[in-house]
Image: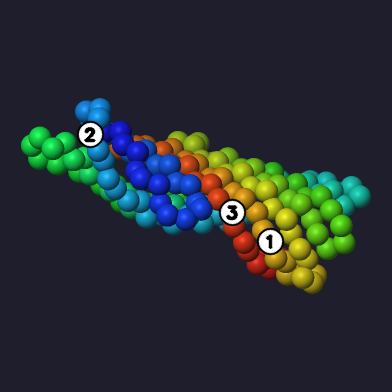
């Protein structure tokens, strides 16, 4: 079954697709919900720094926990339901670039890729942020992030993309 879930309220875009071995009939409404937790942790290595421009290589782990449910309402016969409750972790590798703008303000970009069939088939994340240094170790960040993954298990498959703004307080150690 392939179905598109309704867009949630708020600014964040969520575009999940769930699949089953047997396709659903076209034109029938589907309703559902997705609850998700994602955490990314990295070790960074400063590959280079020149006149404030810094390039870091990163390696780490992104963990997911997903609870998805879709219900097909055919109007003829019984309703069909698909549920997926899974947790997995992906190894991730990427790059982060930081450039000074003015004073304590920096622009930062990050791109990482993961999965490689070990957790999900593929996951990736891109983000751009402005970083305001509050001291030597603390900063306030505003940015925009896009995260996508494609997970397969047996006949089940979950593809999801999420995009939206974020705010963060960061402690560097």
Per the model, the C-alpha gap separating discs 3 and 1 is 11 Å
Q: Is residue 5 above or below residue 134?
A: above
Q: Which residue is mark 3?
A: 165
* Left or right of 52, for residue 11: left
Image disc number at residue 28: 2
Residue 30 placement (x, y as % from top left): 26, 41
- Give residue 16's quadrant in the image: top left
Disc 2 on helix, strand or loop?
A: loop
Q: Are marks 3 and 1 in contact (CB under 8 Å)?
A: no
Query: Which mark's residue is nearer the viewer, 3 or 1?
Result: 3
Q: Decide which of tag 1 and tag 2 comes sooner along the chain.
A: 2
Q: Are marks 1 and 2 in contact (CB under 8 Å)?
A: no
- Give residue 18's quadrant in the image: top left
Query: Which mark's residue is nearer the viewer, 3 or 2?
Result: 2
Residue nearest the observer in this picture, 56 or 71? 71
Q: Count all numbered tags in the image, as a single digit.
A: 3
Badge 1 crowding class, 10 Å Cα cut-off, few under 14, some 14 to 19, many 20 or more, is some
Per the model, the C-alpha gap separating discs 3 and 2 is 33 Å
Q: Decide which of tag 3 and tag 1 comes sooner along the chain.
A: 1
Residue 69 placement (x, y as % from top left): 28, 48
Per the model, the C-alpha gap separating discs 1 and 2 is 43 Å
Disc 3 on helix, strand or loop?
A: strand
- Give residue 151's quadrant in the image: top left
* Left or right of 128, for residue 54: right
Screen quadrant of the N terminus: top left
Q: Which residue is mark 1?
A: 141
């Amino acid at each position: 079954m392939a179905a598109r879930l309704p867009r949630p309220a708020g600014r964040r875009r969520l575009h999940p697709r769930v699949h089953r071995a047997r396709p659903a009939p076209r034109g029938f409404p589907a309703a559902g919900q997705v609850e998700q937790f994602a955490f990314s942790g990295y070790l960074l290595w400063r590959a280079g720094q020149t006149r404030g421009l810094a390039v870091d290589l990163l390696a780490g782990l992104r963990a997911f926990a997903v609870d998805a449910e879709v219900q097909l309402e055919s109007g003829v016969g019984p309703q069909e339901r698909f549920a997926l409750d899974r947790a997995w972790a992906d190894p991730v590798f990427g790059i982060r670039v930081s450039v000074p703008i003015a004073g304590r303000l920096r622009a930062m970009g990050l791109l990482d890729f993961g999965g490689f069939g070990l957790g999900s088939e593929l996951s990736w994340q891109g983000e751009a942020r402005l970083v305001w240094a509050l001291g030597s170790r603390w900063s306030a960040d505003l940015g925009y992030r896009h995260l996508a993954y494609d997970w397969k298990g047996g006949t089940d498959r979950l593809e999801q993309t999420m995009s939206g703004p974020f705010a963060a307080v960061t402690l560097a150690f």
